[in-house]
Amino acid sequence: MTHLPSLLLLGAGGQLGRALHERLAHAFAVDAPPRAELDVLDAPALERAVLAKSPAILVNATAFGVQETERDPHTGFRVNALAPLALARAAEAAGALLVHFSTDFVFDGTLNRPYREDDLPAPLSLYGHAKLAGELAALSSPRAYVFRVESLFGGGRAHGSIDGLVAKLRRGETPRVFTDRVLTPTYVVDAAEAIARVLTLRPPPGLYHLTNAGEATFLEVLEEAARLLALPQRFEAVSQSSANLAPPRPLRTPLNGDRLASLGLGLPHWRDALARSCASALEYERKRNMMASCHPSFPPSPP
Ligand SMILES: NC(=O)c1ccc[n+]([C@@H]2O[C@H](COP(=O)([O-])OP(=O)(O)OC[C@H]3O[C@@H](n4cnc5c(N)ncnc54)[C@H](OP(=O)(O)O)[C@@H]3O)[C@@H](O)[C@H]2O)c1
């Protein structure tokens, strides 16, 4: 029997974590303890637990979100900054590779071109500050990869902003969509594939932007999703600049993915990714409807 390298995955129940679990299980012996078994809030205990498990690879897909961090900054900094520090220390001590994820929210969104990895961060929110601290903490290990992702969509646990707005369309609602928010969305399936390839090819560790290629406004992404899913193009188009969001969000944060692309690890264009994600959602729906018609008691689940 082939001996697969051991990989400890934290946050496997999340949107990105689920896609990572599914993909990485093909090439690694994945241990994915739920939060109840391994809570990242207690940094010293986390460090001890990781050292005891001593995996070859450590992947951290845990998250404490923008609104949550605003409401509870203490927990936000523990999950988003102190946990990566504990993981970096444990990775160092165990000689493990560390994979950690960050966000476009480390930038203020005022640059008039896509952000590169070496552009100066300037977070607007406590979440952005905590994630930036988490990046630096993770990178204190010379064996760490930090990937900035942006506006995740697709996968089994679809709850990001793009999927949330599509779900509203499906329910016949008229979602409020920003016309001036510019982004590069990230299909979790593509991100997971890229991580699997990184772990095989082992490019130099460090900071990378990991999003699909291209850029778009939120409205363009939603219009394309509606077209692909044959849903009505019914949006309340509003401008983010005049929405007075609290905490403030950056307006323009397309991420430049040239660093990964130059290693042959670039992701497909977001339109291609969205087409595959929508096709997979439609296929899931078709199978669910078929099951429901064969087994009338089959519980219909939300899209
Ligand atoms: N979503 C986006 O659009 C987006 C954008 C930019 C960057 N990111 C980054 O991408 C990464 C993944 O985000 P995501 O959206 O996939 O996250 P998510 O869906 O919110 O999932 C977060 C995961 O972290 C786990 N978790 C939270 N607190 C924990 C704790 N104290 N101990 C152990 N596990 C804990 C959750 O456990 P439960 O399953 O028990 O809840 C869940 O499995 C994060 O680094 C995030 O900052 C996300």
Image (tube, helix red, strand yellow):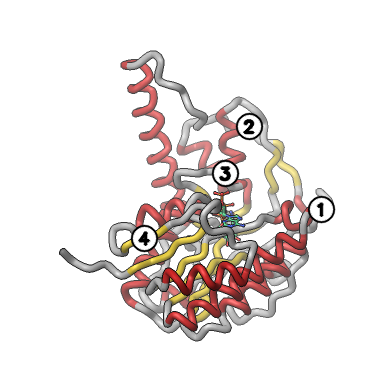
Instruction: Give the residue type that dot 4 points to.
Output: Val
Callout in the foreground (1, 4)? 4
Residue wearing tag 1: 246
Three-letter amino acid code of the residue under disc 2:
Arg
Foreground residue among 241 and 37: 37
Q: Is mark 3 within 8 Å of ligand 1?
A: yes
Name the outermost residue toward the top: 296
Q: CA distance from mark 1 to mark 3?
A: 20 Å
Q: Quadrant of residue 1?
A: bottom left
Compare marks 1 and 4 and give the one earlier in the sequence: 4
Does residue 187 show up? no
**Measured from the top left, where is residue 298 in percent x and y?**
40, 20
Q: Secondary structure at mark 1?
A: loop
Q: CA distance from mark 3 to mark 4?
A: 24 Å
Measured in 3D between alpha carbons, the distance from the residue under mark 2 to the one under mark 3, in whole angstroms, is 20 Å
Residue that protrudes farthest toward the left in the picture: 1
Name the residue tied to disc 3.
159
Say which label, 1 or 2, has the lower sequence index: 2
Tell me the amino acid under the disc marked 1: Ala
| Alpha carbon distance from label 1 to label 2 | 26 Å
Residue placed under numbered mark 4 in the picture: 30
Pick whichever, 179 or 54, lies toward us: 54
In screen coordinates, is 130 left or right of 172? Answer: right
Counting the numbered discs, the total is 4
Considering only order in the chain, which callout, 4 or 3, is on the residue closer to the N terminus? 4
Give the image location of residue 90, x and y in percent.
51, 77
The residue carrying mark 2 is 234
